[in-house]
Image (spheres, grey):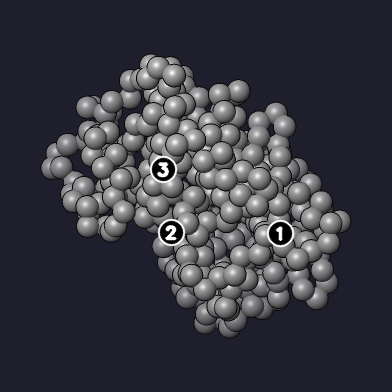
Amino acid sequence: MLEKEKKCIGIIFGGESNEHYVSISSAKTVFKALISKTNIARFKVKAFYINKHGVWINNNQSLELLKQNSSNETMDNYQIFPKGEINFPNKIEFQGIDIWFPLLHGLNGEDGAIHGLLKFTKKPLVGGGILGSALGMDKVLMKRIFSHLEIPQVNYLTIQNQDLSDDNVLNKVSDDIIEKLKLPVFVKPANSGSSLGISKAKTRSEIIKALQKARGIDSRIVIEEGLNIRELECGIIGNLKLIASEIGEVSYSTDWYDYDSKYSMDNQIIIPADIDSQMSEQIKDIAIRSCRALNIYGFARVDFFLEKISNKIFLNEINTIPGFTSKSMFPMLWNASGLNIDQLVAKLVDISSDL
């Protein structure tokens, strides 16, 4: 195959969110898959790294970052903000991209911002569109839509348009939580990922601290009842037709599945999860219905709670740009479903070409 016949994939990674380094790890995995022996004849790559200050780094330097096996030392060389210079889109080589592959986790990525920007290039992208991304990222809107559609969720409250810096407001909100929900509760920023900003609270004082922590990330907050659960996850890929992966379970030694747990070597990943076939099909059905409800397509990871005492399934959330790190569940789920990482990445690119 001639070089000119290869599709040029534009990977965008890094970003200003609190998942900056997770995004870099995901981008490295996808980059290796695109230039693997399986895919090198089909694809070539341009890379666009966005540093922690929002500065876009050129293709050559971005590719060097993706080729680095170590550390943050090289990355940190690109964290200095050029004085008086905003370099986007000046000097960034957008020409020649056939398909975009955004891997910006969290802010400006999963919330649909990057999808809106890339829409102006009139080139397809891997993943969902603006609306599905925004709804999937925003836990408040997502939960309200699912409630309307009677998709099972744990009991929850939402907070928005409240000044939590005011002690009187903070105390009233804490009282409402205790009155309306069973303790313990989980307090979550509406727009965040990788469990960042989330706290488990068992007492009134812990609730107040948790609310203060969450509002540091987002003024809109979700509070959920904490159940004794198992964590189950399902991968989704597709466009007009969505396909669900095997169901996986994460078993962790910590009290709950926080940021450190998600990237710990001590977790036990069980694929397929030890559940019966009827429950597996139920989870797959809810996963597909929930993605359809939010107009999510391309790829996603749908997370569930299985309450131990009742054996009931509850939808937790949808991740519209799930991780591709060595510890990420999404590629593991599809590997167990018959697509290794090289095949999965190529499949995602092909799906985007059919849009």
Q: Residue at x 41, y 43 (%)?
A: 32
Establish if 147 lies above or below 98.
below
Q: Quadrant of residue 253?
A: bottom right
Taking the view exactly as shown, the residue that stands out farthest to the right is 278
Percent position (x, y) of residue 328? 52, 56
Ranked by sequence position, the earlier of labels 3 and 1 is 3
Residue positioned 58% across, 83% down in the render: 203
Q: Which residue is mark 3?
A: 32
Q: Which image quadrant: the N terminus?
A: top left
Q: CA distance from mark 1 to mark 2?
A: 35 Å
Label 1 belongs to which residue?
272
In which quadrant is the C terminus drawn? top right
Q: Which residue lies under the disc numbered 2?
A: 217
Asked whether residue 348 is in view, the answer is: no
Residue nearer the viewer, 226 or 180: 226
Q: Amino acid at mark 3?
A: Lys
Q: Amino acid at mark 1?
A: Pro
Please indicate whether residue 42 sits to the left or right of residue 48 in the image: right
* Front residue of 75 and 334: 334
